């Protein structure tokens, strides 16, 4: 690292700086304003917790926040269980259509959520599920599942299948093999997949907006509705809380899941 | 403990035939070596017995009980793998105790039996270590303790020594044999290393292209190989073609090699094999006797390898390999005319002609 700092290096640093600035400056401003007494972004900053206090008093927002959390928790549980089971099946067995099935995991990640949301709304009405919390959870699970499978499968790539054979030769049935040998090895991947699933559900707007019934919106939907009625710094406060939660979750995920799957 | 029998085992992998009509008995309490080049089907056969692969045809029985439809975990086997396959998330004691834990053995008995097994492999003090803290030889011993602690009916070994260096390997061979004797367990051992098979096995089965070539005690196979492949895969051999006649074997140029063996020389065209270590070299023509085969030849090359030397001699248009102990070389000049001789009872008749194998 002793080489002379060159022009390209300065350019690279400047570029990275700009990216980080435009990524985090708005968030930082918003977080600051949630502590500012002025409703109109006026400086100097007068520190206050008023907006947070008002937020706690706003039953609508609080109840939608709790709904978001438990929907995310339910989604995480279902998607992680199904996703881990699917990854194990894809890892252990060769069957006709396996490659096709694996390829079909990626489009849902790439297709715009707006389109998926519309499609789900139409489909759920068509088959009689309609709108409501079950529909929201179903939609979230469908969105989160590919993330879990991709993350867990990446971790499984480092697993030696001979360990499962050794366990079976020692008399362990399927469940014992999975519980004592395979799961301990892929645990970090499963945790990372679960955190991804939580984040996908908790931050989800479009699908929730389409599938939730008017009375029981999730937090992102609630915020959107509130902004349309008129912006208040309460929104800054709740957004700051969401950002803190989301970033904590994602940092935890990256702690468990080294990208590329090696650990 | 149990005897293992396979009958008419056949398996196709797509268009390749991995096993074809293999029938073998693995006697109770014996150490059986499955030997063959890579792709010969020896590992496939082992995995069929273990239950990881289900054959297309044929039957497998362990201790008289037919196991074709029994899954691996119910077959009561112990297995050692090429890379040991120790569970990285468990300590040595937990690895060894795994088979007992899934059998719901109580903690007191589990601890006692794990202790005994570790004692047997001389690792009693290592129970708390993790696999990655052990040397290759120690991992090997843990894998062995883990495989036998459940008192399986048969122990299956899939080239378990191939990852060790030569010195350690020799030590582990002796150790493996000692433990096998002590436990008295029927053992089936897959290897491509002929020396290892000879050292360890009570019986050997040689496989080639998914077929059983020959089966029997190592010494019998060495003394009476069934064909060229068995003769060259287990040891080395010089092949001489000739015609069986009343007085012996007549070569193309009319020379008659005397014949004396358990089996009478059959009439008609035949091939005999002579082990390199059976042949002597001398500068002068040996005294002719009725029971000695004598050929004149030209010494081409001497290859020195410590305790032994290999001499390459051309005689009758054939190249002979002759293995001498190093002190015996002193009486031979390094090139020129020499005489080859061997006792007639060292000529082995090769039946079931197959084309000579190259490269082994």
Image: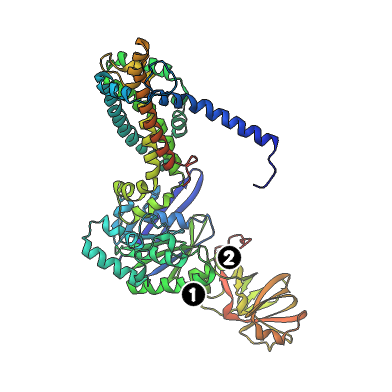
Task: Provide the residue designation for mark 2.
Answer: B228
On the question of residue B186 being in view, the answer is yes
Q: Name the residue under label 1.
A: B219
* Residue at 45 percent of width and 54 percent of height: B44
- From the viewer's side, name the closer residue of B298 and B353: B298
Judged from the image, the secondary structure of the residue bearing numbered disc 2 is helix
For the N terminus of chain B, the image quarter is bottom left
Which x, y percent locates residue A94? 43, 39
Above or below for A256 versus B135: above
Q: What chain does mark 2 sit on?
A: B
In the displayed structure image, the side of residue B185 where residue B242 appears, left or right: right
Q: Position of residue A107 (x, y in %)?
A: 46, 25
In the picture, measured across the screen, residue B271 lies left or right of residue A173, that is right
Residue lying at 42% horizontally and 52% vertically, measured from the top left? A162
Residue A10 horizontal/vertical position (percent):
65, 34
The answer to whether the residue labelled 2 contacts the one labelled 1, judged by CB atoms less than 8 Å apart, is no
Judged from the image, the secondary structure of the residue bearing numbered disc 1 is helix
């Amino acid at each position: 690292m002793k080489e002379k700092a060159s022009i390209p290096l300065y350019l690279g640093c400047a570029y990275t700086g700009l990216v980080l600035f435009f990524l985090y400056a708005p968030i930082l401003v918003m977080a600051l304003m949630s502590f500012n007494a002025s409703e109109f972004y006026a400086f100097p900053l007068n520190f206050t917790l008023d907006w947070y206090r008002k937020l706690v008093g706003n039953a609508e927002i609080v109840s939608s926040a709790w709904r978001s959390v438990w929907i995310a928790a339910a989604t995480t549980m279902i998607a992680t269980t199904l996703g881990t089971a699917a990854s194990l099946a894809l890892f252990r067995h060769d069957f006709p259509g396996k490659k096709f099935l694996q390829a079909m995991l990626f489009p849902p990640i790439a297709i715009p959520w707006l389109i998926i949301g519309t499609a789900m709304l139409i489909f759920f009405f068509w088959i009689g599920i309609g709108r409501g919390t079950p529909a929201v959870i179903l939609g979230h699970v469908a969105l989160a599942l590919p993330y879990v499978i991709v993350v867990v499968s990446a971790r499984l790539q480092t697993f030696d299948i001979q360990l499962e054979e050794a366990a079976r030769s020692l008399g362990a049935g399927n469940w014992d093999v999975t519980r004592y040998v395979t799961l301990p090895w892929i645990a970090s991947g499963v945790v990372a997949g679960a955190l991804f699933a939580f984040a996908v559900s908790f931050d989800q707007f479009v699908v929730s907006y389409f599938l939730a019934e008017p009375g029981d919106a999730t937090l992102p939907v609630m915020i959107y509705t509130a902004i349309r009625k008129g912006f208040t710094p309460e929104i800054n406060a709740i957004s700051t809380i969401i950002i803190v939660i989301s970033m904590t979750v994602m940092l935890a995920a990256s702690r468990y899941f080294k990208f590329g799957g090696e650990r | 403990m149990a005897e293992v029998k396979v009958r008419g085992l056949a398996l196709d992998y797509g268009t390749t035939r991995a096993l074809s009509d293999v029938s073998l008995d693995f006697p109770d309490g014996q150490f059986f070596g499955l030997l063959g080049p890579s792709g010969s089907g020896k590992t496939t056969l082992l995995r069929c017995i273990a239950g990881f692969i289900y054959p297309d045809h044929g039957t497998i029985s362990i201790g008289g009980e037919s196991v074709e439809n029994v899954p691996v975990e119910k077959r009561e086997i112990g297995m050692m793998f090429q890379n040991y396959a120790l569970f990285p998330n468990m300590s040595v004691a937990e690895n060894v105790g795994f088979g007992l834990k899934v059998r719901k053995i109580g903690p007191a008995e589990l601890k006692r039996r794990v202790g005994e097994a570790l004692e047997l492999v001389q690792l009693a003090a290592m129970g708390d270590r993790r696999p990655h803290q052990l040397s290759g030889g120690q991992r090997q011993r843990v894998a062995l303790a883990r495989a036998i602690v459940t008192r399986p009916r048969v122990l299956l070994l899939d080239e378990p020594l191939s990852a060790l260096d030569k010195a350690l390997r020799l030590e582990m061979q002796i150790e493996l044999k000692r433990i096998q004797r002590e436990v008295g367990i029927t053992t089936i051992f897959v290897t491509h290393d002929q020396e290892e098979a000879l050292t360890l096995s009570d019986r050997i089965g040689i496989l080639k292209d998914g077929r059983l070539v020959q089966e029997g005690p190592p010494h019998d196979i060495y003394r009476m190989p069934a064909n060229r492949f068995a003769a060259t895969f287990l040891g080395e051999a010089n092949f001489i073609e000739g015609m069986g006649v009343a007085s012996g074997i007549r070569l193309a140029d009319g020379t008659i090699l005397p014949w004396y063996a358990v089996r009478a020389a059959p009439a008609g065209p035949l091939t005999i094999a002579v082990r390199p270590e059976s042949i002597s070299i001398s500068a002068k023509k040996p005294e002719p006797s009725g029971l000695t085969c004598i050929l004149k030849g030209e010494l081409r090359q001497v290859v020195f390898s410590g305790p032994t030397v290999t001499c390459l001699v051309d005689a009758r248009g054939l190249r002979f390999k002759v293995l001498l102990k190093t002190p015996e070389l002193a009486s031979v000049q390094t090139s020129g005319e020499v005489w080859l001789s061997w006792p007639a009872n060292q000529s082995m008749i090769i039946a079931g002609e197959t084309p000579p194998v190259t490269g082994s």
